[in-house]
Image (cartoon, rainbow, N blue to C red):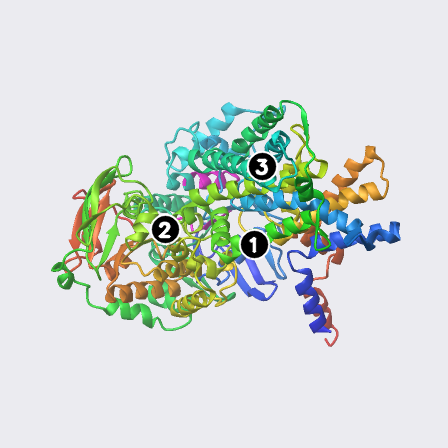
Amino acid sequence: MNDTAARLRAVTGHRLFWPALVLVLMLVANTVYRPGFLAVEVKDGHLYGTPIDILRLSAPLILVALGMTLVIATGGIDLSVGSLCAISGAIACLYISKAPDQNSLSTVFTALALALGVALVLGMWNGVLVAVIGIQPIIATLILMVAGRGVAQLVTEGQIITINSGPYRAIGLGHFLTLPLAILIALAAALLVAAFTRRTALGLIVESVGGNAEASRLAGIRSGRIIFLVYVVSAACAAVAGFMMTANVSSADGNAAGLWVELDAILAVVIGGTSLAGGRFSLSGTILGALIIQTLTTTVYAMNISPQTSLLFKAVVVIAVCLIQAPAFRARFARRRSGPTPGPAAPQREKEQVPA
Amino acid sequence: MTDSRPVLTMTGISKSFPGVRALHDVDFRLFPGEVHALMGENGAGKSTLIKVLTGVYGIDEGTITLAGDQVAFSGPMQAAAAGVSTVYQEINLCTNLSVAENIFIGREPRRLGAVRWGEVRRRARALLARLDLDLDVAAPLGSYSLAVQQMVAIARAIDVRAQVLILDEPTSSLDAGEVAQLFRIMRQLRDEGIAILFVTHFLDQVYAVADRITVLRNGALVGEYLTEELPQFSLVEKMIGKELDALERLDEQPKRAVAAQSGGAPLVEVAELGRKGAVAPFSLRIHAGEVVGLAGLLGSGRTEVARLLFGADRADHGQVAVDGGRASLRTPVQAIDRGVGFCSENRRAEGIVPELSVRENMILAMQAARGWLRPIPRRRQDELVDRYVKALSIRPANPDLPVRNLSGGNQQKVLLARWLITEPRLLILDEPTRGIDIGAKTEIQKLVVQLSDGGMAVLFISAELEEVLRLSHRVAVMRDRTMVAQLDNDDSLDADRVMQTIASGTNREEVTR
């Protein structure tokens, strides 16, 4: 009995318990509303079904949010990721559209490398502004958030570039080993970032810089380099997400691609339990956060919630998740629920009076 | 004084936190017109008692009476309104606001909702005059020293018609002259009939200013004593609850004369190192195995010397040689590379990373030196951390606990461990024993002796002259951001002579009495 209680407390005390519970509750609600919600079937050797869709659609957000997690862990923020998605998608699509054979693998890989290279340079730009020049991250990345949209539009010359490239489309819609390629790419990226941070000391150093920058400097950490690095990683993640977004629709729209994804990514990081103040970060929490956001979007469509109320509905759920996830709020809630307990003094005194 | 009735009585106070009994059946009383010192080691329950009194925590059992009425405050604001004001160790005022605004913030005199600024400034000036302070009340508080800020905090506290003034470690960041000024103010307020509850780690200060002493140990009351009836030695014994053998043994050691070290080549040789506005160019030699003490008043440039040596600030003058070869120590990374370690006096802001674990905090400097691409293998981490948790008796001995959950003394030991793991050749310790209890203090002092015996050079900075004299082979004296003397710590050197050097020939101030 006691043992069970202790084990239960260990589970509910886990930092990912509450976000996971919310995700499960949302899935349950969907299943109640539409019993076939969780059904997955095999068609033409591929897996199909709503859960697979959710995973596939959340892939770009997971990618962006992974990079964002590292940036936020250093105490920074990267608002430019949406624009970076647009720029990288636009460059890749532009290169492919100009190529003689859009279906050639080498064309697609050259396009990807080119776009990724540009994104890395832009990530370095962010990194220099924050780590070298010392501009506050929110301002430094706001520059590229605004200017980047302009760059994307210059690349596309204000048009929507449409391409017809099988290999490129596969990034968003292809399958490998029965699973959508996008899911596998996101998974690979997650494993890569996890290995990059937890197999090396990068994670510790990022958390140290975010937890106390001055103490880290005096411990001999070159915080500048680390901060520079996380903005570059964030840009790389955003670029790959941009490929997926444009591959999904086989076209690049400088205005719409990756619009507001930075906000969803920040939200995913926060839902996942990483503090905006920096310090400890959780990659699995971030992935869970991204899944919650995508499930929510799918739920809004699946339950036929009217478009007028859907944004408000999302907002309410997000607020609820954030509150449930906050230890301070749970503590207050728990205290109120248990009610005012009588102090140990009162009953004891009564007992003493009885024999007297 | 003693025949009057206590203004404040706390009877049978108990307070528990989950898993901890912080206070158990504690009685405490406070008479008007006395300075009453509350003594005890870290974790003895001093802060809890104050927080229970001012309503930060509720009490489990017991009663509090103030001026004859039973009270239970809901928080410090209500307590202050009833006449129980607190000045905390960390000054919680706004440095960007003016002195006058800080004194009256939250209770500004108003007319029709508008703040009467003229009145605010006039009353602020009057209050400060009462404390014999001549400040520009319109200047931002941040433009004054910490000591003055502390006085302003007291001015704020006594304005609320205080009957009881609680000073929680008010002197931990003040130098001797400022302490004397504070004591003058405390005596003046005492003579006006205010009851002052004084918490400090400095025994000398207790004997300088307190009329009565209450000792707590492990959350329980040890006793209440008149200061003149309790010799300093017995006080320490009552706080610790055991014979103070360790401290005695250190005291009995012969003076750590310099003879052995002066022959060889210096490990670090500093020539005319300086930085404008921080510290005037100074020269200093430190040999392997030598402890050089750095004495001087607060703000005399002690910390600045340490920061220049470690590259925490950049020197704009002079040079440093390590092992006879010229070395550039312009950043912490370069200094660490040359075998220098630096424990900052500002533990919280420049030392620990609060949310990281004890283990992570300990390996941080070593990991930084290796670079992020070469993580320290987990087994090696455990080995190192285990060794130092044991060697420094860090408690609780759980390396996976966030370091913020440890007491100040144990956090200090974690920082020491962080540097010891890097096996430095010169360790700079800036106020390593400040604000920690006497047991941990003795352990750290013993460790310094051990390390220097093992060949490590130590630059030891402390505001406590006794401590500097006990540990150092040589004492460098700072005054007004200049190194004015370097004295061999032989039999002729005592605290008085160091004080005289600090005062540099001028009549030295009576500091403690």
What is the crowding at mark 3: few (fewer than 14 residues within 10 Å), some, or many (at least 20)?
A: many
Name the kind of residue labelled 1 in the image.
Ala
Tell me the residue that label 3 is attached to.
A111
**Residue B167, magenta (yes or no):** yes
User: Which chain letter goes with mark 1?
Assistant: A
Q: Helix, strand, or loop for circle 3?
A: helix
**Residue A82, magenta (yes or no):** no
Q: As drawn, which residue projects farthest toward the front?
A: A100
Q: Quadrant of the N terminus of chain B?
A: bottom left
As rendered, which of A354 and A341 lies closer to the eye? A341
Of badges 2 and 3, nearer the viewer stands: 3
Whole-percent x and y of residue A229? 48, 43
Residue A245 in view, yes or no: yes
Q: CA distance from mark 3 to mark 1?
A: 27 Å
User: Which chain letter goes with mark 2?
Assistant: B
Q: CA distance from mark 2 to mark 1?
A: 33 Å
Tell me the residue that label 1 is attached to.
A194
Count of labels shown?
Answer: 3
Lower sequence index among marks 3 and 1:
3
Residue under the image location 44 percent in, 58 percent down: B375
Residue A170 occupies which quadrant of the picture?
Answer: top right
Which span of residues is magenta-colored? B151-171
Give the side of residue B81 with respect to residue B302, left or right. right
